[in-house]
Amino acid sequence: MGATFDYWKLTKTVLFYALVLVIVVVSVFPFYYAILTSLKSGTDLFRVTYWPTSISFENFRQVFSQGAFPRNLLNSVFVASVTVILALFLAVTASFALSRVRFRGRSLLLMTILAVSMFPQIAVLAGLFEVIRFLGIYNTPWALIFAYTIFTLPFTVWVLTTFMRDLPVEIEEAAIVDGATPWVIITQVFMPLMWPALVTTGLLAFIAAWNEFLFALTFTVSNDTRTVPVAIALLSGGSQYEIPWGIIMAASVVVTVPLVALVLVFQRKIVSGLTAGGVKG
Amino acid sequence: MATDAMAPVGTAATPKIRSELLQQRARAARWFLVPMLIALAIVAGWPLMRSIWFSFTDATLNDLYGAEWIGIGNYLRWQVLESGTVRYRGVLADPDWWNAVWNTVRFAFWSVLWETVLGMIVALVLNAEFRGRGIVRAAILIPWAIPTIVSARMWGWMLNDQFGIINDLGMKLGLLSAPVAWTASADTAMTAVLIVDIWKTTPFMALLILAGLQMIPKDIYEAAEIDGVHPVKQFFRITLPLVRPALMVAIIFRVLDALRIFDLIYVLTPNSRSTKTMSVLAQENLFQFNNFAEGSTQSTLLFLLIAIFTILYIWIGKVNFEGGDR
Amino acid sequence: MASIELRNIRKSFGAVNVIKGVDLEVRKGEFMVFVGPSGCGKSTLLRLISGLEDITSGEMLFDGKVVNALTPSKRGIAMVFQSYALYPHMTVYENMAFGLKLEKGHSKEAIRERVEKAADMLQIRQYLDRLPKQLSGGQRQRVAIGRAITRDPKVFLFDEPLSNLDAALRVQTRIEIAKLHEGMHDVTMIYVTHDQVEAMTLADRICVLRDGLVEQVGTPMELYEKPDSIFVAGFIGSPKMNFLTGEKAEAFKCTTLGVRGEHMLVKPDGIWEGEVIHTENLGADTYVYLEMGQEEPIVVRLEGAMQHPSGSKLRVSPMEDRVHRFDEAGKPIR
């Protein structure tokens, strides 16, 4: 009796860890394989291997030396950073009003903001194109910064509102008694308390802007103004049969490694930010 | 006493004095909201209206301002031929459109279904206590962190018909008898898209479900344990009902996202009729095929579809809010 | 430095009336305590005085001037919150200096001088560079008080400041607040508590609130000796006043007869007899609970340690001149 029980328990443990292993391998393997491929060169590329056989940085050298990829990388950094700063600036004050001041129509406004974040981007594409042409920013990074506000702003407002709602009322009241105006409360009392939330939302907005494709594809048309997702998507060789997989993988790794590093460093914060934006929202 | 007569507040004899504090806060709130509202109006409200307006015009990419109102013709128009048969034209009579609708719905259904099931499994694993849990959580964040375009390219390489590792693996394990042209063949293109999307998005689903699972008090399970409830029964009787609000919201969130899918399909299976979704079709019509009005019509229809789901989402979210808060 | 006058103050949140017409005068330099059971509106009343809450109707005057519209800082108030509400990211010094910095027109040296003076008063000078999280609960409470002192307020408001402290610290801090009041006797202080012991020990005058209305205002001894209602009689004093009804009250020509435990005498010819059901020995005195056919057991407070085994009979009499007689409406018959 006791022996069979242990046997069953052992089986369960083995099965559980097998499942864990499958989850980890499936999650990590494609990225591992991309790195593996990016380190291959020449005909090695077309031999399937599961372990690194030889390491060559030829693909990386090519990615950075030919074409506009370094420029694209800079564009992406610029666009994503400015987008985040802009969104956070507009969102911090707005979410103070939404979370801390009682006024009529507040919940309707919150619902509208939530609805905007659900917008299919394609639905505004035609109209946005017109506005961008009108502003004369077509085919510049500003077109993307402008367009990305449509998803980063509602998201940051929503998450910061949920965070700010949880800050203790008495601290705000103490500041009011001390003679602080709403602006002082935000900048000198709330912002220092909220920096974890600001980092999280900023990071999530950054990732969203960094990865965006549809607007970037539509509103930029020259090699010099594109961001990396479009550049990687459009990377191709002389003909359809000569897709430069090694270079594509190298570019992919370059684009992804900083993100993966950021995400792993800020794991906990990101998980809480995602759930604040998702479940509560 | 006279004071008792003024019991209903506000009708008081003394005019109510609004406090400076409230006025100051109301004023500040207005100033704080205005920039955001203006930004959203320019970047979302106005473009949406214009897009919808374009769908009722004959606008072309090169002549947006010369667009003239033509009514619902872009949606549906008909023409009675001399033979007496009626010929329908417009997006709603276009087989390509309905093909895209079918592809989108099919994609949304299967991807969300699998992501929910797999996400639930991963969430249950992460909710258990075991050594190395931190590593697993870190590992599943990787697919989520990888840009969609990059994952499309990565998987495109892995699913390559000649040199792809998936074919290699499948044949070594005896699952495949011959290499499959995953992304190019009409039969498997949708499967390929689904594999990549499920791989990339299941972590997100798992994290949302995990957040729901972690709100379930542990002592409920301890009580069930003492009562000798079988673990499978525990899952269906305790876990599922309690996690359902979070799950429903996550599902609708994902459905909305899946309905607007563009980038993965555009990069992984370009020009494949069997995967072309509403967003891809609309974008192509707008900016590549010079069918601006038709593209606007398609994007408007997609907007309507998603609007319905959004209302559903907010409705369920609100129910959840009221039920969950007190 | 300010006298406060409330004229028919009302406050409602939506349809709920919380303060239902309060008239009250707080004198210059007075220590006034608001006391009452939870939900009586005492905290709301304090917040109305502070200006954090909007007055629905009525007039609030500071030194004869209507201040209904003024912000808290313009009213010249300082407040100590139940949760201390220190700014977690600022050092003790920055916490205390924050209000002065916002006021403009104070030089750095002047601010430092005032913060240090307040810190010396509260013996927290050695903590000025620490963050709130590095302090104990009692130390945080001093910082919260220090922050209020630094602003040199005309009116000092306390919202249940001791309720987060443990019992020993509560007594110690209570004594310090009393000393503080003596040292700043020109500052008007209003203090909210649900603890009648705090009220009795600290107050110059107590305002007992019940259900959004003032039940009675008076010095601690006035409330103790001449309660205006059964409610006040029952609320003030420990152990709680005994209330007797029926024949025993009729013998004193009233509906309800109130006798405090300390005003009961045990003697062989006592007019009432009861059965001992429980004895609490507190060392200095002893509470004996007697079953006398009343709704609640009757408490008798005896000096010194006494032994009265449960089940034994005891005869007691009230001190004739210390009984409180109440009519049907719960009002005293004098």
Image (cartoon, coloured by chain):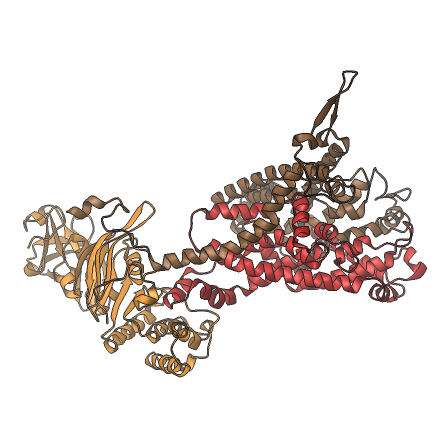
Chain colours: A red, B brown, C orange
Q: In the image, B36: left or right of C262?
A: right
Q: Height in image: A67 above or below B100?
A: below
The residue furthest top is B84
Decide which of B1, A260 is in the foreground and name it.
B1
Q: Looking at the image, which is closer to me, C27 or C327?
A: C27
Lateral position of residue C211 relative to residue C300, left or right: right
Residue C287 appears in the figure: no
Position of C239 with respect to B139 (left or right) is: left
Expressed as whole percent of the image width and height from the top left, the position of residue B19 reads: 33, 57
Return the residue nearer the eye: C331 or A121: A121
Q: Count up the numbered dots.
A: 0
Horizontal and vertical percent for residue B57?
A: 67, 36
Does any portion of residue B244 appear in the rendered image?
yes
Residue C177 shown left or right of residue B167 in the figure: left
Residue at x 70%, y 39% (from the top left corner): B59
Q: Position of residue B15 (x, y in %)?
A: 26, 51
Image position, residue A25 (x, y; %):
76, 55
Q: In percent of the image, x 92 and y 59: which residue is there?
A: A44
Say above or below: B88 vs B33. Answer: above
Residue B242 sits above or below residue A53 on the image: above
